[in-house]
Amino acid sequence: MKFAPAIRDARQRAILSQEELAQTIGVTPRAVWLAEQGAGTLKTLIPILDHLRIPIAGLSPASSLGARVQEARLKKRWSLQKLSERSNLSIPTIRGLEQGKGRIASLEAAIAALAPTARVRKPATIRREAPRGMGHSTVQRLVHADCIDFMHGMESRSVDLIVTSPPYNAGKEYEADLSVEEYLNFAERWVSSIPRLLSPTGALWLNVGYFRPEVGQAVPLTYLYYPLLARHGLHLIQEVVWHFEGGLAYSKRFAHRTERWMWLVKDPANYVFHLDDVRDGTLNRSNDQRNNPAGKNPTDYWYFDRVVGGRTASKDKTDHPAQFPLPMIERIVRACSSPGAVVLDPFGGSGTTAAAAYQNGRGFISVEANQRYHEIAKARLERLRKENGAEPPPDLERIAS
């Protein structure tokens, strides 16, 4: 059993930074960092579990972790010496654990010996709230409309982050069959609104794959979009490669297993990037003391499983044929916007961008022209609100506007 992943997950779901959690429970931020690496002490672990309401299954429901360890040992009729032999912990260390003292790693070793099936469970209901002083945005809109027309009517500088993936002209059920010239005209019409809508520190994350200008060709859409976006004054910060397994198989070319994210901003000298909110602890594969305890920078090559249907259907799968993986969008939202910001998705689809924004304390405007997909997104967001015990926004009727 490992406490660290459950702590990180529960803290991020509560939309608390490590510093804010540390301040709340009265420890140093360093202590929280260590706990999220499984390297801290019970002095930090116990208040973290209490504050984040993280339950433990497989141990007796005693009043404290130390008492649970002792009860489990006595129930098995083990002496301190026997537990020491099974866990490779010293007897003084075990005595300390039973008194609520010691290190997290020692507790994990004792529990592994006493109750191998014990596990840390996710809280049944997590109250999501933005960090103190930065409340939830009241902007929560799922709009059934053509995004080009709708964006023309939006206020200038009204959104902080745009995360979207336009049609590729690659033969999906929701795509028209356009020539290169027709597709460029379509791209020009929706891209032209982006600079006006973004706040001064705003960003656009654009996911694109390949389109088929003629039989046998698969041209990366980055080649078409970069000149267009640059002409409208947006600056490319980085290209991020999304790698996945599965997809179409080919016999006359190598299989496509990647798509591209283009990360662009209005002002390359002033934009939002919260690296500490998206560090990846799984990348700390050594005990190098120079490693940031919160994890490493995720790099520009991301692996996220595609959302698939069928017998191996993903948990969040809807009827939309090209659905974003939610964890991938959450990474973008946490990194490139702040709690309370407004996130726009002009091609909202099944509502994944809206869900990621909602679950991380951001507002959202998700625009979708297809009535069926709009209804899918609406049901999805309503389900999330019920799961989180949240009240509907006061302008619920506008959700379907």
Image: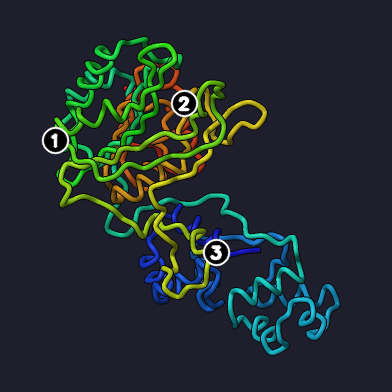
Position of residue 73 measured from the top left corner of the image (x, y, whole percent): 78, 76
Disc nearer the start of the sequence (2/3): 3
Q: Residue at x 18, y 47 (%)?
A: 201
Q: Which label lies toward us, 1 or 3?
A: 1
Residue 234 or 155: which is nearer the viewer? Answer: 234
The quarter of the image holding the N terminus is bottom right
Q: Give the side of residue 291 with respect to residue 398, left or right.
A: right
Disc 2 marks a residue whose amino acid type is Ala
Residue 322 is tagged as: 2
Which residue occupies 16% across, 34% down?
195
Q: Residue furthest bottom?
A: 92
Question: Label 3: which residue?
Answer: 4
Q: Residue under circle 1?
A: 233
Q: Residue at x 51, y 37 (%)?
A: 244
300 sits left or right of 6 in the view: left
- Closer to the N terminus: mark 1 or mark 3? 3
Q: Are marks 2 and 3 in contact (CB under 8 Å)?
A: no
Identity, as a three-letter code, of the amino acid under mark 1: Gly
Name the mark on residue 109. none
Dot in front, 2 or 1: 1
* Figure coloring: rainbow
CA gap between label 2 and label 1 equals 29 Å
How would you rate the neighbour count of disc 1 (Cα within 10 Å): few for under 14, some for 14-19, many for 20 or more? some
